[in-house]
């Protein structure tokens, strides 16, 4: 998936996304960037979404005078929270499911309503924040092209795989999430945000019964928004933002994550119940 995203970037597939009509208001531009993030993250892959969308978002910020740091935080939050549409959207989902993964069709049939609800809710909440021109979030920008290094992203993912292997060595039996749906999401979100969601997913056992693995899946996606170290995608967003001259505040990222996580989990749970994924 990462390689496919790299090829698409090289071919200029996403280049036109930054060339929106100048008459479009700032809120519409931000909404396009966030919806693009959710769509690529959901249909392709989370890490591909951020490395494709961040240059586009920074170009939008430079052209429209937007608060680039706020937009970068919004992209990172959206990418993580909406990365559960398909099993391959987020590597953590494959780790949580392990050998019990359903078919793509079965998984998507259960996830799409919840994914759509989280996408719409997240974008609606983040657009007012990211479309503002607030001095505390801005800095001189050095817009970059939609270019990125396969070697560098391989190093980031490789480091997480090593950490995941280490955790599996120390915890060969893994961790079983306690309690009901809310308790499981809270516990797994704390673990994912503190230790990175990829290593956490390597040791967490998805629940069974009426809840199934969904508490762990949602925690490894939206729950990773509590701390900047919770996801490789967030680290990539911060790096790309800082390379463009934007001030990506880890404290503001956490504040946004803490505020939105209960809402995102609530609407995701409602969508999963509507689709019959959880009962």
Image (tube, rainbow, N blue to C red):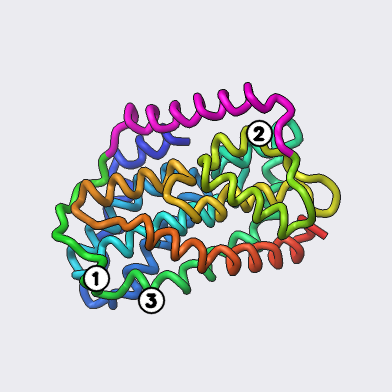
Which residue is at the front of the view, 206 or 46?
206
Residue drawn where x is 71% and y is 67% of the image = 270
> Residue 157: within the magenta?
yes
Q: Is residue 189 left or right of residue 41?
A: right
- In this rendering, the answer to whether 170 lies above or below 91 is above
Q: Is residue 1 visible?
A: yes
Circle 3 is placed at which residue position? 128
Which residue appears at 82% of the width and 45% of the height? 208
Residue annotated with mark 1:
21
Q: Quadrant of residue 72?
A: bottom left
Ranked by sequence position, the earlier of labels 2 and 3 is: 3
Mark 1 and mark 2: Cα distance apart in space: 47 Å
Disc 2: which residue: 203
Question: Seen from this angle, which residue lies furthest top?
Answer: 169
Q: Quadrant of residue 207?
A: top right
Residue 237, how many percent across, how many down? 35, 49
Q: Is residue 183 magenta?
A: no
Q: Residue at x 59, y 69 (%)?
A: 263
Gap in Å between the C-alphas at discs 3 and 1? 20 Å
Element class at badge 2: helix
Which residue occupies the foreground of this view, 57 or 10?
A: 57
The reply, left or right, for residue 135 in relation to residue 57 is: left
Marks 2 & 3, CB-CB < 8 Å contact: no
Establish if 146 lies above or below 77.
above
Boundaries of the magenta span: 148-175
Task: Locate residue 269: give its quadrant.
Answer: bottom right
Sequence-first disc among 3 and 1? 1
């Amino acid at each position: 998936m990462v390689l496919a995203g790299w090829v698409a970037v090289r071919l200029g597939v996403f280049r036109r996304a930054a060339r929106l009509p100048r008459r479009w208001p700032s809120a519409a531009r931000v909404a396009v960037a966030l919806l693009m993030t959710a769509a690529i993250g959901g249909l392709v892959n989370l890490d591909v979404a951020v490395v494709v969308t961040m240059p586009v978002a920074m170009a939008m910020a430079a052209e429209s005078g937007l608060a680039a740091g706020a937009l970068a935080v919004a992209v990172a939050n959206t990418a993580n929270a909406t990365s559960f549409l398909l099993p391959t959207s987020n590597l953590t989902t494959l780790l949580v499911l392990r050998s019990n993964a359903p078919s793509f069709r079965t998984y998507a049939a259960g996830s799409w309503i919840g994914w759509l609800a989280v996408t719409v809710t997240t974008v609606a909440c983040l657009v007012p924040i990211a479309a503002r021109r607030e001095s505390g979030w801005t800095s001189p920008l050095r817009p970059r092209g939609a270019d990125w290094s396969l070697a560098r992203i391989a190093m980031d993912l490789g480091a997480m795989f090593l950490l995941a292997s280490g955790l599996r060595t120390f915890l060969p039996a893994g961790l079983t999430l306690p309690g009901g749906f809310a308790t499981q999401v809270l516990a797994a979100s704390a673990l994912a945000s503190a230790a990175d969601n990829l290593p956490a997913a390597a040791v967490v056992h998805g629940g069974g019964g009426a809840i199934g693995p969904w508490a762990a899946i949602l925690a490894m996606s939206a729950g990773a928004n509590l701390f900047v170290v919770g996801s490789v995608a967030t680290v990539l967003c911060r790096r790309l933002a800082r390379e463009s001259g934007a001030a990506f505040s880890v404290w503001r990222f956490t504040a946004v994550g803490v505020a939105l996580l209960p809402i995102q989990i609530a609407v995701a749970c409602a969508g999963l119940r509507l689709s019959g994924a959880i009962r």
